[in-house]
Amino acid sequence: MRASLFFSLLLIPSAAFSQALPDQVLALIAANQAWTLEQQRSICEIPAPPFKETARGVEYAKRLKALGLVDIRTDSEGNVISRWPGSGAPKPVTVFSAHLDTVFPEGVDVRVKTSGRRLTGPGIGDDCRGLAAVLSVAKAFQEAKVKVQGTILFVATVGEEGQGDLRGVRHLFTKEMKGQIDQFISLDGTGYGVTARGVGSNRYRVTYFGRGGHSYGAFGMPNPAHAMGRAIARISDIQVPKQPKTTFNIGTVEGGTSVNSIPIAVSMEVDLRSESATELASLDERFRAALGAALEAEKARWPESRAALELKIETMGLRPAAEPADSLPIIQQALAAAKRLGIPVFATRSGSTDSNIPMSLGIPAVTLGAGGQASGAHSADEFYEETADSYKGPQMAALLLFSLHPPQ
Ligand SMILES: [Zn+2]
């Protein structure tokens, strides 16, 4: 996940849980701390590059089965879906999930190095910690023979990270289980953050094409690199609000063949983001206007040239923004769970996670940290550090599940 910290004021209600079964589950999760860490380590040594999560998904399904989950299946997108059997009435349906994929391509060494409390390896925090925490809750449910109202689906999604563009969770909510899911909890990364708002992002690859030619001999025609320079200058000057946080970035620039050639094509990759769908749409509109104006300005610079200059905008990813209010019960219940465990969470934050999809559909959703500490997410040096109270991550998730699904 990617989180941008934006704090807002909270109203934390007093917790009102029926205690015996939840207490037993909390104790089991704490007692299973070492087991959870071993799940995290071992699942992480199975590669899960974008679009190639199958091997990890197969192993995850096996572990869910061993923990008593039923109706286990892998959908056509690759999501692993299972059901906790100890439930009564079918409704409400909650999906409780973590994501299988990493940002790392095939061939990256995924062996985990352990040194004291520190585990180093690609994806060890994001999201092997979340995957392990989901299993930790399942194990405690199994050991305590938990029976709850409604239906809890334990799920591992594919395609959460950038390139995947939330394809797993999107498939789940728009096809596989369309209209059937009432609420969504995702465990993503470490710590104890409560992500309650979805940062939307629009990502594009922009290319300017021209005829190209010799830098000296063909001089006098529109130049795609110059057009793109004009576009970059215009985009750089776009004004965006600080609140709701709205950003733009030109992340890559490439093209051309040699110093003495007018390029045939140059391109750039652009990331636009906002917590607000309205602001994101407004930024998108101004971004497109800047691209078009740059094209026209470069053409106008060479009125006598007949050489064409064209612009292509390809969509790389669209993640919807969503700003549910903090007063939403699932958010208040998550904060109440944190409070009960003595976790110092005083504010919600916004992020770009699997929850973006349900949030944008108006379905209550929250993404929680899964405990422990980590650094260097999305880098080869990513490490996770086991803290004395890392079990509070899965505990917080379990308490939230109990508040959404009271024990029977
Ligand atoms: Zn993640």
Image (spheres, grey):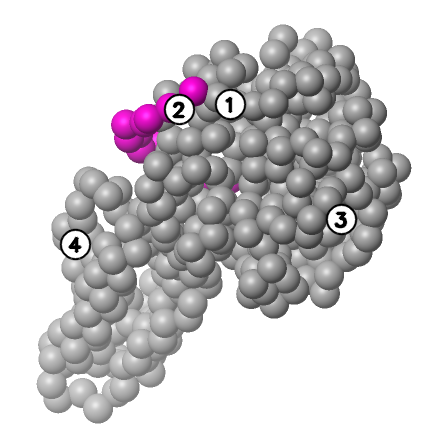
Counting residues from the start of the chain, the first of labels 2 and 4 encountered is 2
The tag earlier along the polypeptide, 3 or 1, is 1
Tell me, for residue 16, which label it has, or none.
1
- First in sequence: mark 4 or mark 3? 3
Q: Pick whichever, 269 or 141, lies toward us.
A: 141
Give the foreground label among 2 and 4: 2
Q: Is residue 387 above or below residue 191?
A: above
Residue located at (44% from left, 58% from top): 361
Identify the residue under disc 4: 238
| First in residue order: circle 3 vs circle 2 | 2
C-alpha gap between disc 4 and disc 3:
46 Å
Give x and y (percent) for residue 331: 43, 35
Callout 1 secondary element: loop
CA gap, disc 3 and disc 1: 28 Å
Q: Residue 105: percent from the left, percent from the top?
A: 65, 48
- Residue 378, located in which quarter of the rendered image? top right
Residue found at x 81% / y 51%: 72
Q: Are marks 1 and 2 in contact (CB under 8 Å)?
A: yes
Circle 3 crowding by C-alpha within 10 Å: few under 14, some 14–19, many from 20: many
Front label number (4 vs 3) = 3
Badge 2 is on which residue?
13
Q: Amino acid at mark 1?
A: Ala
Magenta stretch, main secondary structure, is loop
Q: Which mark is residue 82?
A: 3
Does dot 4 land on a helix, a strand or a loop? loop
Tell me which amino acid carries mark 4: Ile
Can residue 284 be seen here?
A: yes
